[in-house]
Amino acid sequence: MPTLPIAPASLHLLRLRLESEGVDPAGILTPAGAATGHALAARWTGFVRDRAGLEDAAHLDARWFGPLLQEFLAADGWGDVVTSDLAGTAVLLESRNAAEADPDSATAPGCHFTAGMLAALLGDIAGESLAFLEVSCRSAGDDACGFLVSSAEVIAAASDLLAAGGSWREAVDPLVRG
């Protein structure tokens, strides 16, 4: 499948236009991002083969996953995405230069396209649907865009805490501390 570059300004414009029309941008941009994530997942196998010499990307050692994912996404212009394993309970993906972020332009996380893309990409790589939540965003004034991957229970608790004005970390920290 050919790749088609899209300027970050296009994603900003789409989000702003949907919001101005009273439409929830996440409902449109997240599934659109998922379509891109599925396409990227198809390329991931070849990327791992070329960079790590593995015919089956499922055999990639976990310690190489984060650095290769960062290289893979940065090469396509998504920004530098750093992965952090939260004690086997969750994975946090963070980017201080996420392409979709439009710094200080929103009151809530707004990287809906990127969230859909990452959820689909990681789900395809894992071979199963993953629970996923955007927990911070430069568009909303945060230092970095953050995406949490964990069990459905942890994601639901993190989402509830964020909606109540709390921190998603309150849902994860007790599990990390064990």
Image (spheres, rainbow, N blue to C red):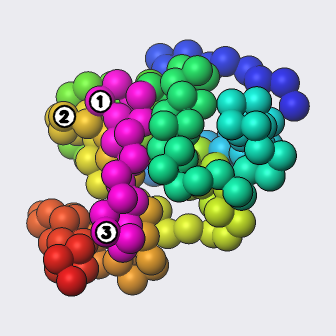
Q: Name which of mark 1 and mark 2 comes first in the sequence.
A: 1
Crowding near the residue tagged with mark 2, few <14, some 14–19, many ≥20 C-alpha atoms within 10 Å: some
- Residue 3 occupies quadrant: top right
List the residue tagged with mark 1: 96
Q: Is residue 48 left or right of residue 159?
A: right
User: How far is mark 2 from mark 3, CA to CA?
Assistant: 23 Å
| Residue 145 picture location, percent across and down | 32, 40
- Numbered tag placed on residue 143 in the rendering: 2
Q: Are marks 2 and 3 in contact (CB under 8 Å)?
A: no
Looking at numbered disc 1 in the image, what kind of residue is underneath it? Answer: Arg
User: Dot 2 lies on which element?
Assistant: loop
Looking at numbered disc 2 in the image, what kind of residue is underneath it? Answer: Asp
Crowding near the residue tagged with mark 3, few <14, some 14–19, many ≥20 C-alpha atoms within 10 Å: few
User: Dot 1 lies on which element?
Assistant: loop
Does 97 lie within the magenta span?
yes
Mark 2 vs mark 3: give the one in front.
3
List the residue tagged with mark 3: 87
Q: Are marks 1 and 2 in contact (CB under 8 Å)?
A: yes
Foreground: 84 or 112?
84
| Residue 157 picture location, percent across and down | 29, 78
The range drawn in magenta is 80-98
Crowding near the residue tagged with mark 1, few <14, some 14–19, many ≥20 C-alpha atoms within 10 Å: some
User: How far is mark 1 from mark 2, CA to CA?
Assistant: 6 Å
Count of residue discs: 3
